[in-house]
Image (cartoon, rainbow, N blue to C red):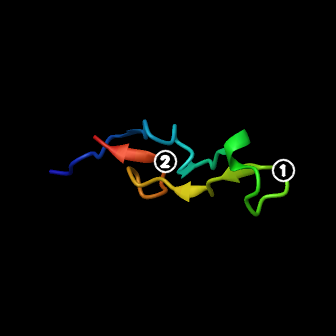
Amino acid sequence: MSEETKKSVCPTCQGKGVIDGVCETSGEWQGNDAEDGQVCTPDQKCPTCNGTGYVED
């Protein structure tokens, strides 16, 4: 008997495998190292699916 593994799109990263970084701007952050006052988080591999974009059902 062989088991079929069903995969569905990862709900955390929407199947991309990577969670996009986000940039935010706030007047409170003026004076930080960023020239334009933006604070950004880097792109990171999705922890839910380990970067595959799919989760096994």
**N-terminal of the two: label 1 or label 2?**
1
The total of numbered circles placed on residues is 2
Left or right of 54 in this view: 40: right
SS at circle 1? loop
Residue that label 1 marks? 36
Return the residue nearer the eye: 50 or 54: 50
Kind of residue indicated by mark 1: Asp
Q: CA distance from mark 1 to mark 2?
A: 33 Å
Badge 2 is on which residue? 53
Q: Nearer the viewer, mark 1 or mark 2?
A: 1
Q: Nearer the viewer, residue 23 or 11?
A: 23
Q: Is residue 15 visible?
A: yes
Q: Within the image, what quadrant is residue 26 found in? A: top right
Q: Residues within 10 Å of mark 2 (few under 14, many from 20)?
A: many
Q: Does any portion of residue 25 appear in the rendered image? A: no
Q: Is residue 24 left or right of residue 57?
A: right
Q: Which residue, as the protein is rendered here, is positioned at the far right?
A: 35
* x, y percent for residue 22: 64, 45
Left-right relation of 28 to 54: right
Q: Residue at (41%, 55%) from the top-left corner?
A: 47
Give the percent coordinates (x, y) of residue 49: 40, 52
Q: Secondary structure at mark 2?
A: loop
Q: Is residue 46 left or right of residue 39?
A: left
Residue lying furthest bottom? 33
> Disc number at residue 6?
none
Look at the numbered discs 1 and 2 and tell me whether their residues touch, using CB distance below 8 Å.
no
Q: Amino acid at mark 2?
A: Gly
Q: Residue at x 84, y 50 (%)?
A: 36
Q: Provide residue 25's location: percent of width, then percent of height.
A: 72, 41
**Mark 1 burial class by Cα count in 10 Å: few <14, some 14-19, many 20+:** few
In which quadrant is the C terminus drawn? top left
